[in-house]
Every structure is written in C-alpha cells, then in structure tokens.
Image: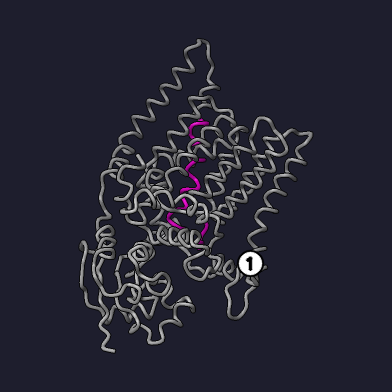
Amino acid sequence: MRVIGIGNFPFPNDDEGTYLAQAWAVRHGELAHYTYWYDHPPLGWIQLAGMSWAPDWLLPDLPAYVQGRIAMLPVAAAAMVLLYVIGRRLGLARPTAAAATLLYALSPLAVVLHRQIYLDNFAVLWVLVSVALALSPRRHLWHHVAAGIAFALAVLSKETIAVLLPVLVVAVWQGSHASTRKFSLAGFGSGFVLTVLFYPLYALLKGELLPGAGHVSLLGTLKFQLGGREGSGSAFQDGTDAHRLFTDWLDRDPYLLIGGAVAALVALAVRQLRPAALAVLVLALVAMRPGGYLPQMYIVQVLPFLALTVAGLVQAAVTRLPAPRAWLRPAAAVAALAAGAVLVAPHWYDRDRAAMSADDNGVYRQAARWLHDTEVGDRAKVRLVTDGVLWLDAVDAGYRPGTGVIWHYKLDQDPAVTKTLPHGWKDIDYVVSTPALRGERQHLPTLRDLFAHATPVATFGEGGGRIDVLRIQNDG
C-alpha cells in the first residue's frame, strides 16, 4: 500500500529534499550539504544515508525524492513489527496486538506520512525500540540500559521527541522488579544521558557549543528553535497554521485521532496501557500549546500510541464483561471489530485509494528530466537556484554542488554561499521556480531580485503547483 504511487503522492515537501541532500553529504564525507548549523541532530540523515544508497544504485533513473521515499519503507515495516511486540508486552492478546498493528498500518495518515522522508519516522522507530526494551518480560538490567540508549538515538534522530521521556520512565518502572527498580531507572538514565551527550560533545570539540562571532553554535540554534521561531498559533483559533494542520489531520483520519485521544484518557486508569496512553496525552498537550511551532509531520509521533490505546482499551472492556457463557467475550470482540470496520473502513478505503492512485508530482518528474536532458552550456560553470527537492537531481545532472546548484534558502542565509555571489543576483544563470521556492521570495532579497529579472524558458504544470525554469536576464 505504501509502495503503490509512492512517487506520485503526496506533493514533495522541501524538508524531504533537505534531509535527502544531507544524507548525500554524509555519503560524501560531510554532515550537511551546506554549513551545518545544528538545526537538528544529524543521526536521522546519517541513517538515511545508510539506506538511500540502495535505491540510488538500483533505480538510478527515478527522481531523487522517489529514491529517498523508497528508502523509508523498511523503517515503516520495522515500526509495525515493533508495535506488535510492544502490544504483546503490554499484555494484549495476539489478535489485539495484530489489530493495533493494522490500525497503525492502514490509517490514511500513516500511509501518506510513512512514505515521506521525515526524521520523525526514524525517531519513532527508536522510541518503539526503547519501549519494547523497557517492557521486556525478562527484566534484565541491560535491557533497561539499552532502552536508555535507544531513546537517546530517538532524540538524536529528531530532538522534539524528547518530550516522551516521562513515558519511558513509566515504562521502565512498570517493566522492572520492585527490588531492582532503582537500578533499572539508573541504568536507563545512564544509557540515555551518556549517549545523548555525544551531540553537545561534538559541538564543544568543534568550538561551536556556545554562541560567538563568526560561527554557528548548538546553544544559539537551540535558543532560536525554542524562542526565535515563528509559532503556529493556537489549534483552537481559526486561520492559524496549527488550526489548519489539525483540520487536515482530522480530515484524513478523524477516527484514529479522536478515538485514540478518548481512549487514552480512559486508558490511564488501566495499568498495562498507561505508557501508551501517557504518550498520547503528552504529545497532544505539546501539540496544543499556544504559540509553539507545530510541523506537519508531528502527528507521526502520536500514531503508534493511538493505535495501541484504541485496541488495548477494547480488549480491556471486553475482558471485564461478565461471561456466564464461554462465547460471550469472543462474540463481543467480534462485534466491536465489525462495528469499527463498518464505521471506519469506507473512509479509510477512499483515503488510501486516493493516496495510491493520485498523481500530483508529474511536474517534479518533468523538471528533474529537464535538468538531466536540457543543454545549458557547461554545467560545471552554470549557476542554478532550486528548492531542496530538486537540489540533488541537479547535482546528479552534473551541476556543481553547493555553489553551482544553490538551495534557495542559502542565497541570503549562508555566508559561505553569499561570498561567492559578489554581484548578487547577477551571478545566477537559472532559477527553477517551485511552489516552495516562490513561497519564500518575500523573505529572501536575492531571490526576490532574481524573480524581477527572470524570463521563463520552460513551464511544467499550471496554477500554484506549477514549476517554471527561469533564465536570468543579466546584461553583464
């Protein structure tokens, strides 16, 4: 289901191109394709680098973002297996754990977001590893140490998932013997802290831990991420980015989101389900905080725990039914399953079929083909501006990475790039104008100047989703 139409839907997100280009940089011996400014810990795209070489080698004719999406499929598959394992370790019966896995696998939100190149998918995978180890039935100390290490790897893949730390503490508490619990908690904390400290240690050794003149810094970027970034507004206020995101999520899958949120509130009273329920509530509270920044892919972190709480609460309710006859509880479980299927299946079927059959991305395929096939002179000397999605396609086509093909964000924001543009916009030959790039021109003066002196030479698609190739009119 995730494979069918993977390159056709959804429309590429500029973040996908960024992470894929950073993975390309790792494969070429660098942490990022431009100056690494600690926007995220690098482990996420380091993992992507280890997985993206195979699609690149086996399917070289596909656009770069499609190759990257194919590399994400094993991550989604591993997460489903781990979800089943966690379900069993939470005390769910095999059919119930399988049902939770199906809820997770078939949700339209998961089908779309798991095929995209997001660091959150790697972070969720490591969180599930951590929860599975924390709830290990053997209750060995090394399992809890390994749970701490796995959770640190999750944070080093996407730092925002650190808010789940209380959930992991609860999981270790429930998964340890009372007599050795303090050692288990200490082992978990040691594994987590000692592993996650590698990130600030790296910054310290490079002289980039503290803010200062002439260099990027970990703490300076962290301050920007926490307080300097424009917020998404309140989820409850019409017209805000957060409200639009919640509306989109609910439109795609209201059943798992609303049902899982209600189930989480009730499941807090069920000891075995408490870690999953607490995860849902913590992530929901963070998402609904006023004034914070809320990214589109944030919902990825919540989905596995929603599925566990819904399936687990149904099982808890069925097992609490009086059973004067042996067939009553199985019949109640089948009835709950049938009712859910009748209510949910039509909506999910329509949404999942649309994700598999839609073709929104022909313009990106055509633009990538133009970059590869069109003669523009010596590509090693031509200077081209594009968005993150097409950056790697341009590099593969022979344009010089970094300062030959330029990611549009770096025109005015990276001194290593701006110093190579002594004449500003006049040093650029072409712009590949995509929706993401056009959306940023009011914030980037050089990009705005390029549009003012550009002539279209090729156009793919129409309307707001089109892609234009613009030649810069530079008499000098």
Which residue extends farthest top?
325
| The N terminus: image quadrant | top left
Q: Main secondary structure of the magenta part?
A: helix
Which residue extends farthest right?
179
Classify 401 as above or below 144.
Answer: below
| The C terminus: image quadrant | bottom left
Classify 145 as above or below 244.
Answer: above
| Residue 315 in the image, given as x and y percentages of width and height | 51, 26
Q: Is residue 390 among what the camera can see?
A: yes
Which residue extends farthest bottom?
476
The structure residue drawn at horizontal position 36% and vertical position 30%, both measured from the top left corner, is 341
The structure residue drawn at horizontal position 59% and vertical position 52%, both measured from the top left corner, is 163
Q: Nearer the viewer, residue 120 or 29?
A: 29
Pointer 1: what residue? Answer: 203
The structure residue drawn at horizontal position 25% and vertical position 50%, both measured from the top left corner, is 359
Q: Which residues are magenta?
A: 289-313
